[in-house]
Image (tube, rainbow, N blue to C red):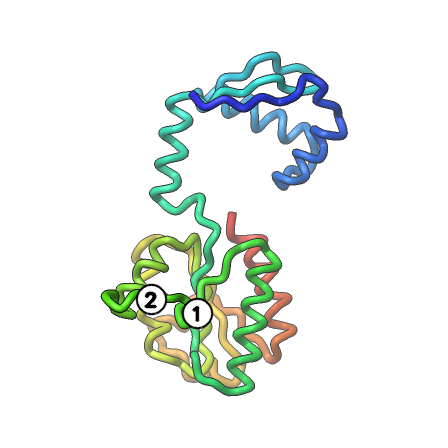
Amino acid sequence: GAEINIPSKYTYEIKNKLANSLYFQHTYELDFFIRTLEELGYIDIKNLTKVGIERVNLTYKGLTKVIENKDNDVLSNRCFIAMSFTDNDKINAIREAIRESVEYTKYEVILIDEKHINSDVTINDAIISEIRKSKFMIADFTENKHGVYFEAGFANGLGKKVIYTCQKDDMKDVHFDTKHYSHIVYENVEELKTRLINKIEAWIL
């Protein structure tokens, strides 16, 4: 299996830094996570001590799990943005607020009008491909563009998480088929950014 060598002088400071970089609250959670992976047969640990790990082997079962997760987009770092592309100050401000929120949470922003699309690929094929490769979607219904409904529905059909957002003045026009979903309804872009960041950090694993 794949092998990771960790220096034997695996000090508490290094261990704590690793735990923080992987978003564990403390090193005890990291130890529990590593031991659980071993019990599940995903990794083989050599010399696990209170001060650290000397070597970790990824087992065949673990490698199979990684490939499975990759195929199911579990490991994707992409967020597809479905929204109006009208060129006006209102939409441009919303676009940048969504972009900043996604980038703040360390995900890659996918906006179809910013992607280079080969001439032999239709825009619909490109949209479907990008949604498939994304971990989750943000669907903003401001201006109620029909394409946003299609893209959100397709993502839902794939079992991907969709975060619904809409500017307050436009919420009254949202179609009844999607209105029952929980939306982030915002009055200004600062409110959108704050609530969107909180939603991503709480809901997207």
Q: Secondary structure at mark 2?
A: loop
Quick one: which residue is furthest to the front in this view? Answer: 119
Q: Is residue 63 left or right of residue 19?
A: left
Amino acid residing under circle 1: Glu
Q: Secondary structure at mark 1?
A: helix
Quick one: which residue is furthest to the left in this view? Answer: 120
Characterize the local packing of mark 1: few (<14), some (14-19) or many (20 or more) Cα atoms within 10 angstroms. few
Q: Which residue is mark 1?
A: 114
Amino acid residing under circle 2: Ile
Q: Position of residue 149 (x, y in %)?
A: 34, 72
**Front residue of this view, candidates 11 and 171:** 11
Q: Is residue 57 left or right of residue 197?
A: left
Q: Position of residue 22 (x, y in %)?
A: 61, 39
Q: Which mark is residue 187?
A: none
Q: Which residue is mark 2?
A: 117
| Residue at 48% over, 51% down | 77
Q: Examine the image and state in which quarter residue 150 appears.
A: bottom left
